[in-house]
Amino acid sequence: MTTANKITILRILLIPFFVVEILYFVKTGNELHRLLAILTFAVAAVLDGVDGYIARHYHQCSELGTVLDPIADKLLLVSSIVVLSFDHAPRLAVIPLWLTGTIIGRDLLICLGVIVVRFTVGKVTVRPRLTGKIATVLQMVLVLWILLKWADGQVAWLQIISLGAGLFTGASGLLYVWDFMKQLGAHPASSAKTGATDGHK
């Protein structure tokens, strides 16, 4: 349990507090809850960079860290996007349901791909791409845009950011599927067997 992993676990523990603060703001309209939600989101985002720096700089990279870090990232973003997809008018703007479905669908597709490749090949190589990083940044910008109430009276910008996040999220998902297919295709288990009798010859 390295320092970097402890920070990652702290990021995960901040997520329920973040969600609860949003729900309290929507229910009561108390601005303190909205500010605490923004602060929690910002702290979790900053700690994401901190634990990565510590892991690299102090050679604390571990198998646990490679699993926990992306989980913490996904939990924060997905929980934020799901909560903000509900109609909280007039307190907060709403994230389009099609974008929420795109983000969750991509993540489920990636999880399924990892399971299939791991089961078939034995090892999964996940190569981060620029499209995925841009999608993550746009999703975070979208969440902050709504929490900071910049979307009020600026619906066009909200739509533009949502469209950009959706396009890059979809593109990154397709690229992950392409990588998984190449890994499966390069493995002997994917080769056709001669003399098959089950109809797949």
Image (cartoon, rainbow, N blue to C red):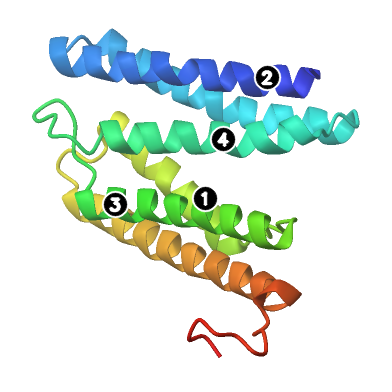
The CA distance from mark 4 to mark 3 is 18 Å
Residues 40 and 178: in front is 178
For residue 101, which numbered disc appears in the image?
3
| Amino acid at pointer 1 | Cys
The CA distance from mark 1 to mark 4 is 11 Å
Residue 189: x %, y % from top left: 70, 72
For residue 7, which numbered disc appears in the image?
2
Residue at disc 4, secondary structure? helix
Q: Residue at x 74, y 30 (%)?
A: 64
For residue 111, which numbered disc appears in the image?
1
Of badges 1 and 4, nearer the viewer stands 1
| Amino acid at pointer 2 | Ile
Q: Which sits earlier in the primary sequence, circle 4 or circle 3?
A: 4
Q: Residue at x 17, y 34 (%)?
A: 86
Residue 176: x %, y % from top left: 56, 64
Of badges 1 and 2, nearer the viewer stands 1
Q: Which sits earlier in the primary sequence, circle 1 or circle 4?
A: 4
Q: Which sits earlier in the primary sequence, circle 2 or circle 4?
A: 2
Up-down relation of residue 196 to residue 49 (above or below): below
Residue 170: x %, y % from top left: 41, 64
